[in-house]
Image: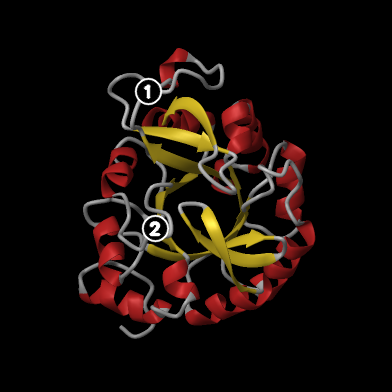
Amino acid sequence: MLSKRIIPCLDVKDGRVVKGIKFKDHRDVGDPVELAKYYDLEGADELVFYDITASSDNRNIMYEVVSQVAEAIYIPFTVGGGIRSVEDIRLMLNAGADKVSINTAAVENPQLIKDAAKLFGSQCIVLGMDAKAISETPDDGLNVRDAISINPSSQWEVRIRTGSGDGDSTNIDAVKWARYAVELGVGEIVLNSMDMDGTRQGYDLDLNKAISERVSVPVVASGGAGGNEHFLEAFGSGKVDAVLAASIFHYGDNKIQETKKYLFDNGISVRYEGK
């Protein structure tokens, strides 16, 4: 059985790590390079770096910060935010990233997934997905193929350009988009619940389960971790392969090794130094 992964997330804005609630009201947390070093030493399995306003600001990701983080750590490192082309992906991989996450650009140009997977391998290409529960069916959005559009049975919609709020509606069903993206070549999905982000009330287990059961690639739960029991729930009923968390680690509420011990003691296979 493959070990489950614990992945701290660095949301970076204006060169600083920040954390908000439901993508709003961001608070400064610290320096991305120093935090990356800390999590490497703490025993994180991987690290994710998101330049959260690159897409909404219509600018490129911060290459120098990515390069500095990559040089400072030894664990696998995923970067995302403002990735729009194959050349952007190449640049991030050359800067030291192991994987590149694409979100807005993948929705607007799905061919980017296929081209990138062919050039760099599916193992390098991550689909970042911001999903929001549907209260009513949107009547606008991008022109997408009918096969992945929202219908009356849809429960979650994909949102893009979410760096500073609710983002833009796409009229795309989250579950259908996940399946289609895997067909195109993504090797992993980071699934962020916009409704639970920063709330510390737990992951959206229904959302994670719905997608984990319908795709053949690893799914990483994101948005809502507030305690070790939430990680256990995500691996159990949520059926995910990894958990992404920010607030719970940034503010010192949990140490990664303590979290791993809790999971290990509850029957979850993790890379835990104390066993």
Which amino acid is tagged 1? Thr
Say the numbered circle drawn on residue 137. 1
- Asked if residue 251 is positioned above or below residue 81 in the image, the reply reads below
Three-letter amino acid code of the residue under disc 2: Ala
Locate residue 104: give its quadrant: top right
N-term-proximal mark, 2 vs 1: 1
Seen from this angle, which residue lies furthest bottom?
A: 274
Quadrant of res 36: bottom right
Question: In the image, is 116 to the left or to the right of 263?
Answer: right
Mark 2 neighbour class, 10 Å CA radius: few under 14, some 14 to 19, many 20 or more: many
Q: Position of residue 86 (x, y in %)?
A: 72, 37
Residue at 65% x, 70% y is 32
Q: As rendered, which of 94 and 164 lies closer to the eye?
A: 164
- Per the image, label 1 sits on a secondary structure element best described as loop
Secondary element type, mark 2: strand
Q: CA distance from mark 2 to mark 1?
A: 30 Å
Residue 137's place in the image compared with 90, above or below, is: above
Give the label, 2 or 1, closer to the camera. 1
Residue at (27, 76) in percent of width and height: 262
The residue that disc 2 covers is 242
Q: Estimate the x, y position of residue 203 in percent, counting from the top left.
A: 32, 55
